[in-house]
């Protein structure tokens, strides 16, 4: 069994793998995995453009799949790894699912709800809180986003087509 720091890098690498799959599909490159007992139980990557559904974020997809895999909406004892700081909608789903821990790569200054704009993970008014670790593989996460948006600006990607 690896320690938390080793696991965090290992599972963030997996989240980044799914983020790269989103990139290949012309989606904002965000990938997520949910881990329980050192095993990946689900994954997801953004599908908002392809599906034309606003809620098809990597975290939501991974949460839905984890609930199905465990046969329960309560994902206690799990950790969510995602390469970009979750938004308000995704943090709401994380709270509802009772995820124990969230690890993310880089901040999202426009939508982030775990430190950038809000600190929802530690809001004592809510009936669930979770632990947080930010900055795991931060540079790799930032570079992937920069590469994606540079490709769009250069006209190599057209995110307006399914």
Image: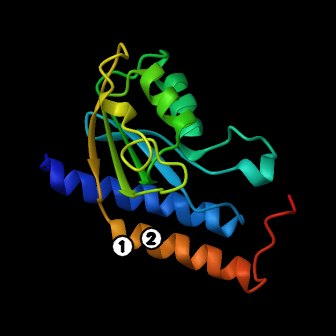
Picture coordinates of residue 72, whole percent (x, y) = 47, 15
Left or right: residue 41 compared with residue 1 = right
Q: Residue furthest right?
A: 161
Count of numbered marks: 2
Above/below status of 138 relative to 128: below
Above/below status of 49 relative to 35: below
In front: 4, or 42? Answer: 4
Left or right: residue 144 compared with residue 78 = right
Q: Name the quadrant containing residue 54.
A: top right
From the image, tell me which residue sits under label 2: 142
Q: Name the element at disc 1.
A: helix
**Residue at the spot 48% in from the left edge and 57% down from the top edge:** 109
Q: Assess disc 2: are there few (<14), some (14-19) or many (≥20) residues with their C-alpha within 10 Å of its C-alpha.
A: some
**Residue at the spot 43% in from the left edge and 24% down from the top edge:** 95
Q: Name the quadrant containing residue 60.
A: top right
**Residue at the spot 32% in from the left edge and 65% down from the top edge:** 137
Picture coordinates of residue 92, whole percent (x, y) = 50, 28
Above/below status of 110 relative to 90: below
The numbered disc on residue 139 is 1
Contact (Cβ within 8 Å) of mark 2 with mark 1: yes
Picture coordinates of residue 28, whole percent (x, y) = 63, 61
Q: CA distance from mark 2 to mark 1?
A: 5 Å
Q: Assess disc 1: are there few (<14), some (14-19) or many (≥20) residues with their C-alpha within 10 Å of its C-alpha.
A: few
Left or right: residue 121 compared with residue 63 = left
**Residue at the spot 51% in from the left edge and 28% down from the top edge:** 93
Picture coordinates of residue 96, whole percent (x, y) = 47, 20
The numbered disc on residue 123 is none
Q: Residue furthest front?
A: 117
In front: 34, or 98? Answer: 98
In front: 154, or 2? Answer: 154
């Amino acid at each position: 069994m690896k320690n938390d720091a080793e696991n965090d890098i290992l599972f963030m690498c997996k989240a980044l793998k799914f983020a790269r799959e989103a990139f290949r599909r012309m989606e904002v490159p965000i990938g997520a995995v949910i881990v329980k007992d050192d095993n990946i139980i689900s994954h997801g990557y953004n599908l908002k453009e392809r599906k034309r559904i606003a809620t098809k974020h990597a975290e939501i997809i991974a949460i839905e799949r984890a609930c199905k895999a465990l046969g329960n909406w309560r994902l206690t004892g799990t950790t969510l790894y995602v390469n970009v700081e979750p938004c308000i909608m995704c943090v709401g789903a994380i709270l509802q699912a009772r995820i124990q821990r969230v690890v993310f790569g880089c901040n999202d200054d426009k939508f982030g709800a775990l430190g950038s704009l809000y600190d929802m993970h530690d809001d004592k008014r809510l009936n669930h809180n979770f632990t947080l670790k930010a900055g795991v593989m931060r540079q790799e996460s930032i570079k992937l986003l920069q590469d994606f948006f540079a490709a769009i600006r250069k006209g190599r990607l057209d995110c307006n087509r399914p």
